[in-house]
Amino acid sequence: MADTGTTDKTKSYDGFTEEERAAMKERAQELKKAPRKKASAADGEADVLAKIAEMPEGDKAMAERLHALVKEHAPQLTPKTWYGMPAYALDGKNIVFFQSSHKFKARYATLGFEENAKLDDGAMWPTSFALTEITPGVEAKIVELIKRAVA
């Protein structure tokens, strides 16, 4: 029987998940919005804070703390959203982002660094970290990583 292009609810789909498709749609909206106006840091911050406000309580607390740490220790980074996640950029290039555990139904939230972050350390180094809470020790490590990333 020829494929008519209709979807059969009983068949499984091995492509993108619903959450991944939603993230791609958010990214498309971010890209559409960008050329129409030169986004200011205030616009980006408002977008980031709105995304943080949508998060479940545990992730929201971590995202709020990360936002405060970035503002305090790397004020040269510009807040923006990236695939619907809070992110921070330097000269338009993403440096660090926060992915809520809820975003892709993961077991933990993720603190991630993009390739423009200056974290290179030998032939191999981590670029993302699982987060379940921000303790004083975790906070100190985050501050160290953010400072290195923009050095």
Image (spheres, rainbow, N blue to C red):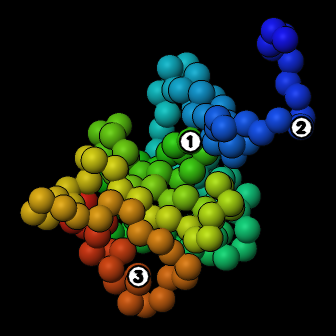
**Which residue of the protein is positioned furthest toward the bottom in this rendering?**
136
In the displayed structure image, the side of residue 28 where residue 73 appears, left or right: left
Percent x, y of residue 7: 85, 24
In the displayed structure image, the side of residue 65 where residue 16 appears, left or right: right
Q: With respect to residue 57, does 20 lie above or below? A: above
Q: Residue at x 32, y 60 (%)?
A: 127
Look at the numbered discs 3 and 2 and tell me whether their residues touch, using CB distance below 8 Å: no
Q: Compare residues 46 and 65 and report the one nearer the observer.
A: 65
The residue type indicated by label 2 comes to: Thr
Query: How far is the residue under mark 3 from the one under mark 1?
Result: 25 Å
Query: Going from the N terminus, do you reach mark 2 or mark 1 first?
Result: 2
Quarter-wise, where is residue 104 in the image? bottom right
Q: Nearer the viewer, mark 3 or mark 2?
A: 2
Q: Nearer the viewer, mark 2 or mark 1?
A: 2
Q: Which residue is mark 3?
A: 139
Q: Quadrant of the N terminus?
A: top right
Query: Going from the N terminus, do you reach mark 3 or mark 1 first?
Result: 1
Percent x, y of residue 93: 33, 40
Q: Residue at x 64, y 42 (%)?
A: 20
In the displayed structure image, the side of residue 6 where residue 14 appears, left or right: left
Percent x, y of residue 44: 53, 44
Query: Residue 83 shows which numbered tag?
Result: 1
- How packed mark 1 is, by other alpha carbons closer than 10 Å (few <14, some 14-19, many 20 or more), is many
Q: With respect to residue 75, does 17 lie above or below? A: above
The residue type indicated by label 3 comes to: Glu
Q: Compare residues 108 and 35 and report the one nearer the observer.
A: 108
Query: Going from the N terminus, do you reach mark 3 or mark 2 first?
Result: 2
Q: Which residue is mark 2?
A: 10
